[in-house]
Amino acid sequence: MIYKILFIFVFTISNTLVADSFRDNLKRSVVQVKVTYQRNNFLAPWQPKPPKTIGAIGTVIGKGQIIVLTNYISDYTLIEVKKYSSYSYFKAKPVKIDYESNLTLLEVEDKDFFNDLKPIDFENISSLNVSATFCQLDNSGVIQAARGQILGMDIEPYSMGNTELPQLEINSNEKLDGSGELIIHNSKIIGIVSEFSGSKNSGKGIPGLVVRQFLRGKNLAQKTIFPFKGFRFRPIVDNATREYFGLKKEKSGVLVAELFPYSGAWNNLKINDVILEFGEFKIDSKGFFEHPFYGKQSLSFIAHTGEEFGNRLGRSIPVKILRDKKELIVSLPLKPFPYNSVQIPYSNSQGKKPLYTIQNGFIFLELSEFLLQEWGNNWRSRIDKKLLYLYDYHRIHKNEKSGKIILLTQVLPDDSNNGYHYTTMKIVVSVNEQKPRDLISMEKMIQNSENNLIKIELENGVEVVLDKSKLKEANEKIQKKFRLGKLKNFEI
């Protein structure tokens, strides 16, 4: 009995020493990141919102670089990093920003910053529903750890992306920020915490396989290394639908419900095609395939993170489909998410400021999710229902010829626009009876109009008439009156 107690005591001490040693090494690979940022102001786009500061966790990787979450450096004006052995902050700058994976690479201006730091490698998780430790660096340069579990893995777009990627589902009863803490299992670094809700004790993490794929593409000219399959699908679970599309009893698959213009699927798949096999895998009635390690996963896994199956940007996937009740195989080119297919920008703005133009006090912008979010956390219940409908069902172009949705967002009151002072968030239908494709084309229509009176038709039959002969004088007056820096932020 004495020997047994002694063995347990020695074993516990040994484990503690290993843990302490691991933590001591880990602090050389984790840094604090301080970001000063200014969000765009979509209601007054000529002036940004007041600056704020936020903290995140960065991880040192090879060649003197740091990986950090993209959503923490969005709209940055200054990025600084601090390591365990210093109380000073060092300036850093992003060299690779990927919105799809929510990962960004930073470089530090002072190369000596990395002298006592050690890069780490991310590894793939080998199993799910396991215990995990979540680590970060505190202000005193000590690694703080929280215990929890990895419950499973789902696949969906990340907070700033459009491409469905694997996400770890995590749980912990201890405090986490979701700001880039490392996920560790069996002394292996297998991911990064990207979201966490203290009230629910749950969150999400970016698995090592996504981090590794991002790092393999860090030197590519493309903004992302992650392909996008180019379509959305819906399940086929009822017999009536199966019979209608000619799906035999022994077969299963999903229905192509939406195609993205400019994607690899646009000219190769059709709406109502039934996908039977994707790559080398059979697809079930809900869109899942059997992954050799992770069990049932969405077919999106094959296209978006299927490097292990030979699927990467620039290559094609063979897809067996049922079209008009006949089986055939089509080749699906793998391309990045086509941002030019987006009619109403959402998730991320690609680092771009909102385009605007002000004519005679009338402020015009293109409809975006970011504009609607200016109405606060409950914006969906506060905005015009037509705009909500457009956002929900028309974010993606239905064809390659459709344009942006332009809004008269508000009016800067002046004698020259009297009668319109309370006009807000109205859709522009036409300019001189022609539909503008986007805000730049609308500005060109105004500038190049041969008519002295420029008629801008809004929804519900409301008309705004600009007198071109008086427009310059009115614009200068309003610019001075409201202290506007610029009346538009683009050139034509």
Image: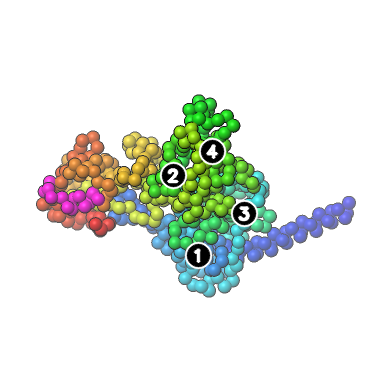
Across and down, in percent, residue 94 comes to: 45, 63
Which residue does the numbered mark 1 point to in the structure image? Answer: 81
Q: At 53% across and 36% down in the image, what residue appears?
A: 253
Picture layout, residue 9 above or below residue 395 = below
Which residue does the numbered mark 4 point to in the structure image? Answer: 276
Give residue 462's quadrant in the image. Answer: top left
Under mark 4, the amino acid is Leu
Give residue 409's quadrant in the image. Answer: top left
Which residue does the numbered mark 2 point to in the structure image? Answer: 268
Distance of mark 3 from mark 4, alpha carbons?
A: 29 Å
Q: At 35% across and 53% down in the image, what residue appears?
A: 40
- Magenta-tinted stretch: 441-453
* Helix, strand or loop at mark 1: strand
Q: Is residue 429 left or right of residue 302?
A: left
Across and down, in percent, residue 333 comes to: 47, 50
Distance of mark 3 from mark 2, alpha carbons?
A: 33 Å
* Helix, strand or loop at mark 2: loop
Under mark 3, the amino acid is Asn
Camera-nearest residue between 410 and 236: 236
**Looking at the image, is mark 3 or mark 4 nearer the viewer?**
4
Q: Is residue 469 left or right of residue 71?
A: left
Distance of mark 3 from mark 1, alpha carbons?
A: 27 Å
**For the residues bearing labels 4 and 2, Cβ distance under 8 angstroms:** no
User: Crowdedness of circle 4 by 10 Å Cα count: few (<14), some, many (20+)?
Assistant: many
Which residue does the numbered mark 3 point to in the structure image? Answer: 124
**Looking at the image, is mark 3 or mark 2 nearer the viewer?**
2
User: Crowdedness of circle 1 by 10 Å Cα count: few (<14), some, many (20+)?
Assistant: many
Under mark 1, the amino acid is Val
Q: Earlier in the sequence, mark 3 or mark 4?
A: 3
